[in-house]
Amino acid sequence: MTLIVAIDGPSGSGKSTVARGVARELGLDVLDTGAMYRAVTLAVLKSGVDPADAAECARIANDADLQVGAHVMLGGEDVTEAIRGPEVTSTVSQVSAHPEVRHELVDRQRAWIDERGGGVVEGRDIGTMVFPDATIKVFVTASDEERARRRQRDEVAAERAVDVDSVKEDLARRDRADSSREASPLRAADDAVIMDTTDRDVDDTVQDIVERVRAVSD
Ligand code: DC
């Protein structure tokens, strides 16, 4: 059986931290699909292509020499930090809304699992679209306040100081765009387990998921 742990949720929900913890506990690799959309967005911005031009964005996605692991490499260049910058963050929802771009990246996400025979995959549409037959689907949430606080903490740690109100506005704008787009909008799969991390320890959430995986795969 191919063991696939699908972890979806909005930004700042804690899903990346949870996904990494689950992967470590289970000895699996983890794929951050948001980093893939971010890297393609960076390539679009660098090339000067209009982010609204679906065909051109798709061409860039198809041609992208992209590796997503502990570091994100684009055309041999380490873009791990560059993809978290404000230009990419404010444009990524537009680029990731193009079905042609999604098509290419979803193919790569499925190939990633095929190569490994399983893994932990985190994003927005993993349980609904990419792996509808995943072993387990988790939808991670947290209150708007808590998500904004976490995002701001990340920004400060990366020396990109911004105030909490603008982080909140950016999150709300991105949530709206990601949830209302036509192609694979952000939503919990009907059979996903919803986990609210607002007042919950990361380790506790990770253990909960690991136990559920063991219960269905043993
Ligand atoms: O997880 P993140 O915030 O780094 O994701 C960046 C953007 O990528 C997010 O605003 C929407 C898009 N995304 C997507 O459309 N589908 C995914 N599976 C993952 C991310």
Image (cartoon, rainbow, N blue to C red):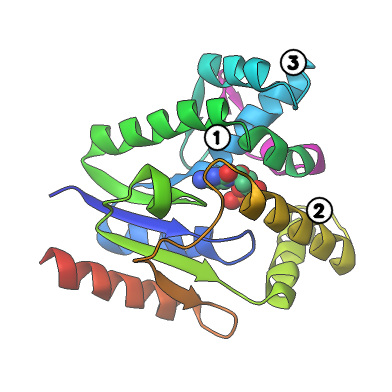
Q: Earlier along the polypeptide chain: callout 1 or callout 2?
A: 1
Disc 3 to disc 2, C-alpha distance: 26 Å
Asked whether disc 3 touches disc 1, contact meaning CB atoms under 8 Å apart, the reply is no
Regarding mark 3 in the picture, which secondary structure is present there? helix
Tell me which amino acid carries mark 3: Ser
Q: Say which residue appears at 59% left-offset and 36% top-offset.
A: 37
Q: Earlier along the polypeptide chain: callout 3 or callout 2?
A: 3
Disc 3 to disc 1, C-alpha distance: 18 Å
Is residue 211 shown left or right of residue 199?
left
- Check if residue 77 falls in the magenta segment: yes
Looking at the image, is mark 3 or mark 1 nearer the viewer? Answer: 3
Ligand 1 closer than 8 Å to the CB at disc 2? Answer: no
Q: Say which residue appears at 35% left-offset and 62% top-offset.
A: 137
Q: Residues within 10 Å of mark 3 (few under 14, many from 20)?
A: few
Which is nearer the eye, 188 or 163? 188
Regarding mark 1 in the picture, which secondary structure is present there? strand
Relative height, residue 180 to residue 167 (above, below): above
Total marks placed: 3
Please provide percent x and percent y for residue 164. Answer: 85, 68
Classify residue 87 by image quadrant. top right
Is residue 119 shown left or right of residue 188?
left
Residue behind mark 3: 47
Residue behind mark 1: 72
Classify residue 23 by image quadrant. bottom left
Quadrant of the frame with the C terminus: bottom left
What segment is highlighted magenta in the picture? Answer: 73-87
Q: Residues within 10 Å of mark 1 (few under 14, many from 20)?
A: many
